[in-house]
Image (cartoon, grey):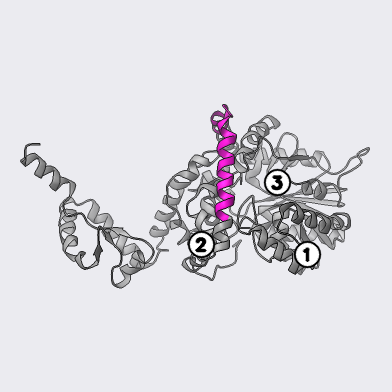
Amino acid sequence: MSEPEVATPLRERTGHALRDPFLQQALTIATTRFIDLRREAFGDFPDGESLRDRARAIKEATLQRLDHHVERLVASVESRGGHVHYAVTAEEARAIVLDIARRSGARLAVKSKSMATEEIHLNEALATAGVTPVETDLGEYIIQLAHERPSHIIAPAIHKTRGQVAELFERELKRPAAPDPEALTAIAREELRRRFLDADLGITGANFAVAETGTVVLVTNEGNGRMVTSLPRVHVALMGVEKVIPSMSDLMVFLAVLARSATGQKLSVYTSLVSGPRRGGELEGPEEFHLVLLDNGRIAQIAGSLREALACLRCGACLNVCPVYRQIGGHAYGYTYPGPIGILLTAMLNGPRSVKDLAHASSLCGACADACPVRIDIPRMLIELRREVDERRIAPRGERAAFRALARLLVRPAWYRLTARVARVLQAPFVRGRTIRRVPFDLGEWTRTRDLPAVAPRTFQERWAALEREGR
């Protein structure tokens, strides 16, 4: 298991999110802005759709020969003086990083933004081992000060307003802070500058790793990534094995669609290519470079129902357009990865039992698939997850019985017509206008948060037959 058991029920988490006016304000502003920027970025990019197809094809071809490309990557990294480690589980990944920290005598680690380190709960492990982890991405730094976890894949503090961040800085850093982005950024920069200089260990994730050259690619909008990879004596990069790509020409395709999908930029401000430790004659870079390849359930899905999710670029575009995410934010999902793709990744890492409720936290509207830069069919896989939850008897017994009964009813036209006639009579006490707003007993849980259209006075078939009798 990669995640702790989520104790609070999904309904309680979503209810809390829906009642938080600051969260609603922050989500509306941020996601709307991301959607507009992405639309503009692809609107004047004539090759965008063909490049999305190309990116999808590269990912699929790479997964078909993943072992070959990983072996190539390992050989390339080692030929440049780097060290490669393989972790089957999150526990193994933590142990590898902690061993590197222990052998290097590290007491302070600076970190660039990395969802993989969040996935394995690395910060907690480092702190327990006596190594102080410091997040240097502004959003990650904010949520670290708040003792929270990221609520968005690319914008960790999307759930906070600038006023809340100012209050947080005043409380945690003991210094006045105006609710102005530039002022808040200046404070964070000043606080973090000395951490970069004092750090023994730099830890990053990886957006991509190029097999032919052994190059780890970091795509950021802040200079902290460069600082983390160049100033500390030891650099550790942690990445899921699916992030490997064959060549530098393939990298160009992904860079063209990633920033546009994530932030609406043609290219992120910083695209850092890291190729092993510092060599003779070079003025900056680490003395040691370690690449940790993380499995943690990924390899099993190459032949599994969630295979497509391995193509995810972690751009966050599906979160921004998801009507569910835009209302409840990331923390309500309860696990490291939020949003539509997060449900699939959670199932991949923790099994279908972990998403018995989350699998239904989607409208299946298809907006996520339309926004995905590699065209992952997220709605299809969510439906497959729902089916698996039912077939493995993970869903509550009453829910499984209800859907089985409905399935039988829908394939028996005579029963269906009889049920419709009976329902017209039974619904009468609960209909207001054309809507059923409340029903008794356990069925009331369904109508507690949604309205149901009432059964029509006449079916389409009945109306059609009437029209034919009237000669129309």
Quickly name the residue at label 1: 176
Q: Specify the quadrant of the image occupied by residue 271.
A: top right
Which amino acid is tagged 2?
Ser
How many marks on residues? Answer: 3
Q: Specify the quadrant of the image occupied by residue 52.
A: top right
Mark 2 or mark 3, which is nearer the start of the sequence? 3
198 is within the stretch colored magenta: no
Looking at the rendered image, the disc whose residue lies closer to the viewer, 2 or 1, is: 1
Instruction: Measure the alpha-carbon separation of dots 3 and 2.
Output: 26 Å
Instruction: Measure the alpha-carbon separation of dots 2 and 1.
Output: 42 Å
Chief secondary structure of the magenta portion: helix
Looking at the rendered image, the disc whose residue lies closer to the viewer, 1 or 3, is: 1
Quickly name the residue at label 2: 354
Residue at the image point whose x is 48% and y is 62% from the top? 353
Residue density around tag 1, few if under 14, some if 14–19, many if 20 or more, within 10 Å? few
Mark 1 or mark 2, which is nearer the start of the sequence? 1
Mark 3 or mark 1, which is nearer the start of the sequence? 1
Measured from the top left, where is residue 380 in percent x and y? 43, 46
Instruction: Measure the alpha-carbon separation of dots 1 and 3.
Output: 35 Å
Q: Nearer the viewer, residue 388 or 86?
A: 388
Quickly name the residue at label 3: 206
Which amino acid is tagged 1?
Pro
Measured from the top left, where is residue 412 in percent x and y? 19, 52
